[in-house]
Amino acid sequence: MNKTSTTEHYRLFLVERLPEPLTPASAHLQIFDNYIDGTRLRLRLIRDPATKGWVRILQQHIEIEETSTSKLAEIYLNDEEYSNFEQFEGREIRKNRYFHEFDRVNFAFDVFLGELWGLNTARVDFDTAEVLNSFEPPPFAVFEVTYDPFFVGKNLVSVGFDDVRARVMQTGATDGLNLAVPDE
């Protein structure tokens, strides 16, 4: 059995905001993803505001084109190991990740910060492609972007919210989607 990587089956949706009962003050993780140019690698820092603890991970994320499947390999780093990779920081996405269950399905909600402020996503992971295909999106899932490579992290790192808005308008998927930048 290969334990060096996992296969992920997921669907990704745009959402206007965190659905109730979640609020920005709800328990969450702070994620800092730094994408290393010319590779499929990223350095991920995860901070838990409740414990003030940090987790440092080197990840290889391989999207399988035109599917809702990807491969993810991870190496957890200690402080010394991570310091050797700090030279690659700079192409960063920051987001807050919230978790909540709706209709017995676990969702991860990402509220993007910085240049992507206004982009909010909901991701749901599945054990198999069969379960993924039978999933009915919840009402807060405004628009599905699972198959759009624009919304992959390594591509989002070089755009801002205006680019996100233009992409959504280009797809014609503006019905029911508030494209205004939210109040800070």
Image (cartoon, helix red, strand yellow):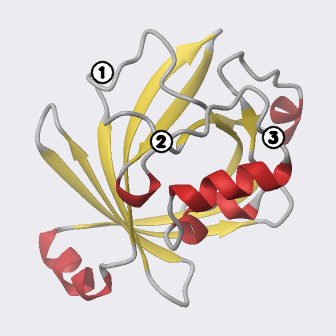
Mark nearer the viewer, 1 or 3 = 3
Number of the front mark, 1 or 2:
2
Q: Give the residue displayed 76% in from the left and 37% down from the top.
A: 174
- Which residue is denoted by mark 3 in the rendering? 173
Q: CA distance from mark 1 to mark 2?
A: 21 Å
Comes first in the chain, label 1 or label 2: 1
Residue 1, quarter of picture = bottom right
Residue displayed at 70% across by 43% down = 10
Q: Which mark is residue 148?
A: none
In the image, is 108 to the left or to the right of 150?
left
CA distance separating discs 2 and 3: 17 Å
Residue 102 occupies which quadrant of the picture?
top right
Residue 91 lies, in percent from the top left, at: 39, 76
Residue 26's tag is 1
Q: Amino acid at mark 2?
A: Val
Q: What percent of the width, then of the height, locates residue 79?
A: 14, 70
CB-based contact (under 8 Å), mark 2 and mark 3: no
Q: Who's the residue at 81% across and 40% down the image? A: 173
Query: Depth check: 165 or 29 in front?
Result: 165
| Identity, as a three-letter code, of the amino acid under mark 1 | Ser
Q: Amino acid at mark 3?
A: Ala
Q: Which residue is mark 2?
A: 181
Please, what secondary structure does the residue beneath circle 1 have? loop
Instruction: Answer left or right for 66 relative to 40.
Output: right
Q: Are marks 1 and 2 in contact (CB under 8 Å)?
A: no
> Does 136 appear above or below 147?
above
Q: Quadrant of residue 70?
A: bottom right
